[in-house]
Structures are given as C-alpha cells and as structure tokens.
Image (spheres, rainbow, N blue to C red):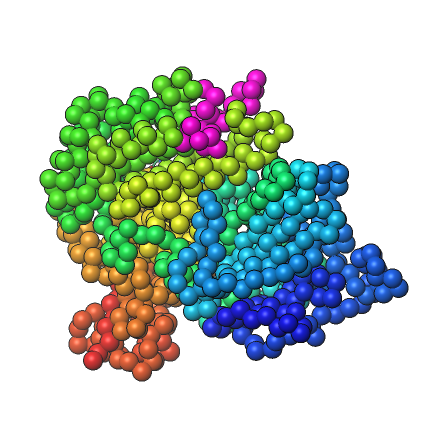
C-alpha cells in the first residue's frame, strides 16, 4: 500500500511486515525517514535532527540558519557537489562542465501495477503498486524519476531510476546508482558474497567501519569475485532474529555496492552500475534508465529474508518454461569428455543416463567449428563434421530415440581469433584501434553493443536450435571484458560500451525467449561468474560453479542461496577424484549436495561400477519424487558451512509444512567423532511427523527444540537424508 499524506508531504510504502517512508521537506529535498519493521506512523519526521555541524555546508538561502545541511540529513537519492559528502547516487557533467547536481521534489504519482523497464530485467506480476517521484535540478534540465515497486505480500520493494535531460544542451552521466538507502544508525554488519572462479559467493560478515566499504565488479559481468547481492543487518542478527536488509541488483555487468558509516554514526548503502569507465551522454529529451534493485527488510532474521527473495524471484522474476513443474534431470558430457568426443561417445553417455532415469542430454563445448581445444572455433556455429559427421540432424534424433530431450552448449558472446567469423569481421570484437587486445581463455569478446553482431549470432544460433530441435541451451561466457572499445560508437561515447554490451546480451536473450518460449536456458559464465538476479529474468537456472566438488559446493551453494532460489542453482554430480580438488567423496554425498540445486550429472556413467549405478538410479528416483518440495518449498540453513566444517545441514520444508527433506553432509573424519543432533527449523510445532516412512513418529516441536540425532557416521564426507511427512 502506498500512502501520500498531503499535510506532511510524506510518502509511505507499506508491505505486510515492513514500512518505508520518505518526505519532501519545505525546501523540496526528498528526505528518507524510515525503512524497517512495519509501523503505522504517517509522519516520522520527528526522527530528523537539525544541528549546526562544523564543515557541514548549508544550501543557499539558508540565511543565518546553519542547522540545515544535506551533509547531515538522510537523503532518499543523494546528490553531488552541493553539500552532501557521503556516497552520492548520481553524478552529472552539466553542459557548463560543472559536476554539480541538486535534486528537488517536483511531484509524484501512485499507480496500480508494476512499472516495467525497457530492455532491462524487472520484477513483474500481480499485486504490485508503483510510486513514481519526480525530482528536478533547479539549475539545469536534469530530472530524476525515482521508481518504487511495492509487492505487499512478499515484502519486496523494488527501485529504479530514470534520468532525463530536459535542458537544451547535452549532459553526461558519470554515475547513476539505482538505490540509495540511508539509516539513522551504523551498528550494522555488512554481509557480502565473495570469492573467485571455482570459489564463488563465500559469505563475509563484518561490522560497518567508519568510511566507505564496497564490493563490485569492473569485469563487465557481475563476476565470480563479488555478487550484486548484499545484506546490512543488526550485529546480533541470526537466522531467526534481528533486523536484516537484503539488497539485490538486477544487473549482469559492472556493479558497485557500497556502504558508508559516516561521521555521525549513521549509514548509507548505494547500489548500481559501477562508475568505472561509465559515461553516458544524454542529448536533450533523452532518458537513461538505471537497472532495478530489489529490497527486502526482514524484521526477524536472515531466513525470512531468504524466503522472501526466493519466492519473489521464483514467482515474479524467473520466467520458467516449466512453470511450477519439475525440470528434467540432465546429463552433461563436459567433465566426461571435454573437447574429445564423437557421436558414438555422446550417444553412449546419453544411453547410460537414460537407463538410469535421466531425461535430458546436454552436449557441451566442442561440437562446432574448429574446436578441439579452447584456442579456436568460437563464433563459427556450424557443426564440426569430423566429430559429428551427420550433424545435429543425425545426433539429436538418436538422443530423442533414447527417450531424452536434447540440449546444447553455446558461447554466443565470444569469438576466437582462429575462426571464420573473426577473419571475416575483426572489428566485431571489442578492442581499440592500434592496440593489441588482451586475451582471456585465448578468446575475444564480441561487441554485443552492435545490433548487426547480435543479428548475426541470432541467425546462426537459430539454425543450431532448429536443426537440433533443442529443448535446452547452456549459454556460457568465459572471460572478463577488457579492451572495451566499440568500432561502432564515436570516440566521445566509449564510456557507454560496458552498459550497451549488457543491454545487448539482454536483448539477444529476450529474443530467444520470445521466439522459443519452451526453451530452457541455463546461464553460465565459467560456472557462476554471472549469477545475478538480472540474469535470472532470462535464464531460470545458472550453472553455479565450475567447482563440482561436493564439499566445496556446500559453501558455494549456501552462499548462493542466501538470495537466489534453490531451483536456480545449477548443480551436478561429477566423477571422483574431483577435477578441481582431487577429492574423493562417495556417490551418495555428491547426490545429496547436487540435490540442493537443479540436480543433474556430469560424468561418464559408463565408467561407474554396477553398485554406483544403483546408487545413481536411486538418487534420480529420489530427486524426481522430491523435486517439487526442494524447488518450491522453503529452504532452511541448519548449520553455517562457513564456520562449521565438521558437518553441514539444511532442510527443504513444504509451504504447508506437511513435508520436509533434511540433508546432512559430514566433513573429513576424526577420531572421537562428535554426536550430531540437528535442531530442525520451519516445521509445524503442532504436527507430528513420520520419519523416513517408518514407524518412528515425532512432534514438530520436539524435532525443532530437542532435535533429531544421527548415529555416528564414521568416514570422510558422508551424507544422510531424512524425509518427514505429517501424520494425518
Ligand atoms: C565453462 C563452463 O562453466 C563449463 O561447465 C563448460 O561448459 C566449459 N566452459 C566449456 O568450455
């Protein structure tokens, strides 16, 4: 519900459990008053404090009043160069060369439904209201429209910003944040998700320090190193208590998430496109739309925050061709063969998979052009007939004859120097003239800011999809952007290329979605280098990491699922010793770890023993039975794998609380093993649950408070699952 109080000029956004309030004050400055657990006050401006603070300037017209300063008051969208020295939301180079921006309230509108953002991912669906607040710079033609989407039921507030040049001369945007959120407290922890390739989204939590602290990416993608999802929470906030604020940016390129604890012990969070090499010219009457950010405030801990993001992302962001239905269990040939396969090898892997209940075969990298290694071939999306003599027209039907769907790997955004495409169009790769390009995995990045490049790739890939009648595509992207310069953009506008590239990726993905509505697209960037809420709008699942080691995955997947739903986390069982870590883990354990995700296989099942195949068959059966519970249910962390390496546990609980699947994986063993008693979460205390379909029945309250104990599990990296159903 969005309310405007005309008398006080406050705008209040209520969700079921939270309230957000701002106020256009007498000077027209839009002040932020509150965001937190729901309160009913129509005007919280009593919280504002006016004091004469040294070196905090006063706006012109203040006369003798030195108590009003943009430097001390909480701002809804902070400005630049006119008195607020904290993190700024926007920076504009005005026509006169000044970098000054002042923004004052000019009006607002409360609209039914959710705003949409042209060419950008955004939440959608029923039950939304929109608030649009217009701010204007009194001294230039720059106007900012602040957009708020309010999803009352899911406690979600989205934000976006549109800057328009209403002047008569061009201006340049040097920084446009999507979100600015002020707090009148600084006793908060900043939680971020960090790592690198094969070590994505490891949680880091630290109290806000004085000054700025930030994570971000300048790699052209959201990156393996940091994620555009952050949390600010009370120091003692845990899974079930404490106020937490989660903020996700729906963007897949360079981003900045910065928090600042300022001189008076208040705090500000900003999030948006990273200003690194960003400079966007706005001609008169042109607008620029910054990507959407989504906010959840949870009054009672991290778990409810996670649940709200999961539900909203699943139901109001991901466009899943399978809807609420289970997606197919897949087998992918990458870790089994890498580039070295032929048609018979692929069919053999698929046949083994089909016999064990798998439903989709995915042919990974190496099927096209001159592609026997990662040194060549990207860009030439025609079949390598040495490997597949009859082409996709011969292979795909053979897979379907096995009762499986056919899926295929592509890397549309890339080109190898050793390719027909590069030889024909060297200027289609990003790179400045007279400067040798930096290589990444020995490949270059196609200039996706250019329509003709996207059109070419689109046409080539259409042929691939049509000839294979593919049901699934893995859309990979295997390097960071460098040499970001486009031959199609004038010298003075090269600061637009990073963002235009992302818009180009979104444009192409949207075209595939529109023209192949039944196609399941799995995003990928060397594993989880582009795992963000923006990508999930186009690709319902994303390969979570190139690290398939079951034990490492416990942390990677736990970090990922703080924001992103389990159904979006690409997770496979692979062979041992694991290719990334050399570790041996039992097949059972690898299955349990992969079940906290999309679930599939990535190995040569022909090399498994009969016993192992039996385990796999059983796993596939279990997953199919439990997939709806795992993917649509509520996910509960039962341990913290970043701190507890002795064992990790989690549970999936159906929303009606009548069913739960508890998973436990132990670490490396020791003598004198500790007893493991898991106190479950999320059950109905008044229901009684049958354990594993047997005779044992236990009350929900007992399972949550007293716990469930696991007999000693000797040996390294063991796993157990317990299935609970409510007794009628
Ligand atoms: C990186 C991906 O993450 C892998 O799964 C695999 O598809 C390779 N690329 C293929 O080159």
Q: Is residue 501 left or right of residue 263?
A: left
Does the rendering let one see residue 354? Answer: yes
Where is residue 371? Give x, y as percent: 31, 24
Please state which of residues 131 and 76 is positioned toward the viewer in this rendering.
131
In depth, the one of 215 and 75 nearer the eye is 75
Q: Residue at x 20, y 60 (%)?
A: 625
Q: Quadrant of residue 270?
A: bottom right
Name the residue furthest right: 64
Q: Residue at (72%, 46%) from the top-left corner?
A: 140
- Quadrant of ligand 1: it is top left
Image quarter hosting the C terminus: bottom left
Q: Which residues are magenta?
A: 426-454
Q: Position of residue 524 (x, y in %)?
A: 38, 41
Magenta span contains residue 443: yes
Q: Where on the picture, by quarter, is residue 58? A: bottom right
Residue 242 vs residue 622: left or right?
A: right
Residue 692's spot in the image, x, y percent?
21, 69
Rendered view: 20 above or below 518: below
In this rendered view, identify the residue nearer to me: 487 or 627. Answer: 487
Q: Residue at x 26, y 61 (%)?
A: 628
**x and y, in percent, of residue 638 in the image:** 39, 66
Q: Is residue 265 above or below residue 441?
A: below
Answer yes or no: is residue 345 visible: no
| Residue drawn where x is 40% and y is 50% of the image | 537
In this rendering, position of residue 623 left or right of residue 89: left
Tell me which secondary structure the magenta stretch mostly adopts.
Answer: loop
Q: Is residue 295 above or below residue 376?
A: below
Is 429 covered by the magenta stretch? yes
Could you tell whether 448 is left or right of 704 in the image? right
* Total labels drawn: 0
């Amino acid at each position: 519900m969005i309310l405007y109080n005309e008398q006080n000029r406050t705008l209040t956004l209520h969700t079921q459990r939270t309230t957000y309030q701002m106020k256009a004050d007498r000077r027209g400055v839009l002040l932020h008053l509150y965001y937190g657990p729901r309160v009913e006050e129509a005007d919280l401006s009593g919280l504002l404090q006016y004091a004469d603070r040294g070196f905090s300037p006063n706006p012109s017209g203040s006369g003798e009043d030195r108590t009003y300063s943009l430097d001390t008051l909480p701002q809804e969208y902070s400005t630049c160069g006119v008195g607020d020295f904290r993190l700024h939301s926007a920076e504009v180079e005005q026509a006169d060369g000044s970098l000054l921006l002042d923004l004052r309230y000019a009006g607002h509108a409360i609209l039914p439904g959710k705003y949409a953002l042209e060419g950008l991912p955004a939440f959608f669906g029923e039950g939304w209201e929109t608030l649009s607040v217009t701010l204007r710079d009194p001294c230039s033609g720059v106007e900012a429209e602040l957009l708020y989407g309010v999803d009352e039921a899911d406690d979600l507030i989205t934000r976006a910003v549109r800057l328009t040049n209403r002047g008569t001369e061009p201006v340049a945007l040097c920084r446009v944040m999507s979100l600015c959120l002020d707090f009148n407290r600084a006793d908060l922890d900043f939680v971020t998700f960090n790592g690198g390739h094969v070590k994505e989204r490891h949680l880091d939590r630290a109290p806000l320090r004085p000054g700025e602290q930030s994570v971000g990416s300048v790699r052209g993608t959201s990156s393996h190193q940091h994620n555009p999802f952050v949390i600010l929470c009370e120091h003692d906030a845990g899974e079930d208590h404490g106020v937490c604020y989660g903020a996700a940016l729906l963007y897949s390129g360079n981003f900045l998430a910065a928090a600042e604890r300022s001189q008076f012990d208040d705090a500000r969070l900003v999030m948006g496109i990273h200003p690194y090499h960003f400079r966007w010219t706005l001609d008169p009457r042109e607008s620029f739309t910054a990507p959407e950010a989504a906010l959840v405030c949870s009054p009672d801990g991290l778990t409810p925050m996670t649940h709200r993001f999961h539900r909203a992302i699943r139901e109001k962001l991901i466009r899943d061709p399978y809807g609420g239905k289970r997606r197919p269990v897949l087998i992918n040939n990458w870790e089994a063969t890498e580039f070295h396969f032929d048609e018979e090898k692929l069919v053999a892997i698929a046949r083994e998979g089909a016999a064990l209940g798998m439903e989709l075969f995915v042919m990974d990298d190496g099927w096209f052009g001159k592609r026997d290694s990662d040194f060549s071939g990207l860009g030439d999306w025609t079949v390598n007939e040495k490997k597949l003599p009859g082409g996709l027209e011969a292979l795909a039907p053979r897979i379907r004859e096995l009762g499986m769907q056919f899926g295929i790997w592509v890397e549309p955004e890339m080109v190898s120097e050793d390719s027909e495409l590069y030889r024909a169009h060297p200027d289609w790769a990003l790179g400045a003239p007279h400067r040798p390009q930096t290589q990444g995995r020995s490949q270059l990045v196609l200039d996706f800011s250019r329509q003709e490049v996207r059109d070419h790739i689109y046409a080539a890939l259409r042929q691939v999809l049509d000839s294979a009648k593919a049901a699934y595509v893995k859309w990979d992207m295997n390097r960071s952007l460098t040499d970001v310069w486009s031959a199609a953009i004038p010298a003075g506008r090269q600061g637009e290329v990073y963002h235009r590239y992302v818009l180009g990726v979104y444009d192409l993905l949207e075209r595939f979605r529109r023209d192949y509505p039944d196609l399941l697209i799995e995003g990928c960037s060397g594993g989880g280098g582009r795992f963000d809420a923006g990508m999930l709008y186009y690709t319902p699942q994303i390969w979570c990491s190139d690290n398939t080691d079951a034990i490492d995955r416990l942390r990677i997947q736990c970090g990922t699922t703080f924001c992103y739903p389990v159904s979006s986390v690409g997770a496979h069982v692979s062979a041992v010793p694991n290719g990334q870590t050399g570790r041996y883990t039992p097949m059972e354990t690898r299955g349990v770890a992969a079940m906290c995700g999309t679930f599939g296989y990535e190995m040569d099942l022909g090399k498994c023993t009969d016993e192992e195949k039996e385990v796999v068959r059983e796993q596939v059966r279990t997953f199919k039975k439990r997939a709806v519970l795992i993917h649509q249910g509520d996910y509960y962390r039962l341990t913290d794998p970043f701190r507890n390496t002795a064992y990790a546990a989690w549970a999936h609980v159906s929303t009606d609380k009548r069913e739960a699947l508890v998973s436990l994986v132990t670490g490396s063993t020791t003598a004198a093993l500790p007893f493991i008693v898991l106190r479950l979460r999320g059950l109905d205390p008044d229901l009684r649950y049958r354990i594993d379909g047997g005779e044992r029945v236990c009350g929900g309250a007992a399972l949550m408070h007293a716990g469930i104990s696991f007999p000693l599990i000797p040996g390294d990296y063991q796993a157990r699952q317990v299935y609970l159903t409510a007794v009628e």
